[in-house]
């Protein structure tokens, strides 16, 4: 697991370096380094907010299966009681979260004015939260064709959780989600 996490970390560093080629407003949203707790800048605040939403959706879908969200296979339950949703979210953060961030920034639906600093913490205005939530809800309701069925993204997440369950409980081979 530590070797896999190291490879994932190295890939993520390269991935984030490409964000500046995608995000048009480099004056307000130039990506330098990924920072958390607290986020160092607006872009990290946006990433953290959207990732948290995806974690919550994944956890919600895990609860609809027979899986125990405390038992992850990649993230260890160190300072958190739950870890499986973190593993599941790794699949969907780039597809759902990052594309939402890119689209909202490049269409200027979120601008530097949508952020506030409160006690040294960077956070969104209430209007910005509402805009992001509406986009997230719409995105989760979009359908894609998968295995001959049209599924919403929320259903795709639940399907992936059920694939993990079948692998663990029924010893079925696990094929991770592939899109495109």
Image: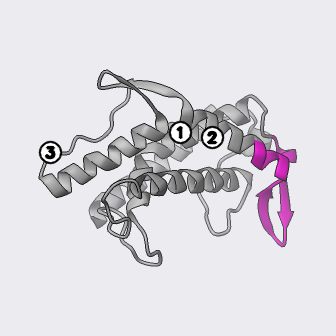
Using the image, tell me which numbered label, if any, was put on residue 136: 2
Nearer the observer, 177 or 31: 177
Q: Which mark is residue 163?
A: none
Badge 1 vs badge 2, beta-carbon distance below 8 Å: yes
What secondary structure is found at the residue carrying circle 2?
helix
Disc number lying in front (1 or 2): 2
Q: Which residues are magenta?
A: 111-130
Vertical placement of 179 versus 177: above or below? Answer: above
In this picture, residue 59 sits left or right of residue 101: left
Within 10 angstroms of label 2, few (less than 14), some, or many (20 or more) residues? some
Which callout, 1 or 2, points at the residue further toward the start of the chain? 1
Q: Which residue is mark 3?
A: 173
- What residue does disc 1 label? 96
Q: Is residue 20 above or below residue 6?
A: above
Q: Is residue 68 visible?
A: yes
- Using a 10 Å C-alpha cutoff, classify the residue at mark 1 as few (fewer than 14 neighbours), some (14 to 19) or many (20 or more): some
């Amino acid at each position: 697991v530590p070797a896999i996490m190291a490879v994932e970390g190295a890939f993520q560093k390269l991935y984030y370096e490409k964000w500046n080629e995608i995000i048009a407003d480099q004056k307000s949203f130039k990506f330098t380094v990924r920072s958390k707790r607290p986020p160092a800048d607006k872009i990290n605040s946006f990433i953290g907010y959207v990732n948290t939403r995806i974690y919550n959706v994944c956890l919600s879908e895990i609860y609809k299966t027979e899986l125990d969200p405390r038992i992850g296979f990649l993230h260890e339950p160190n300072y958190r009681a739950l870890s499986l949703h973190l593993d599941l979210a790794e699949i969907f953060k780039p597809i759902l979260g990052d594309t939402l961030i890119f689209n909202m920034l490049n269409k200027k639906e979120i601008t530097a004015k949508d952020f506030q600093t409160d006690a040294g913490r960077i956070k969104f205005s209430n209007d910005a939260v509402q805009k992001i939530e509406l986009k997230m809800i719409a995105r989760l309701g979009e359908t894609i064709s998968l295995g001959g069925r049209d599924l919403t993204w929320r259903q795709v997440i639940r399907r992936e959780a059920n694939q993990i369950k079948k692998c663990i409980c029924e010893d079925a081979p696990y094929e991770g989600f592939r899109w495109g």
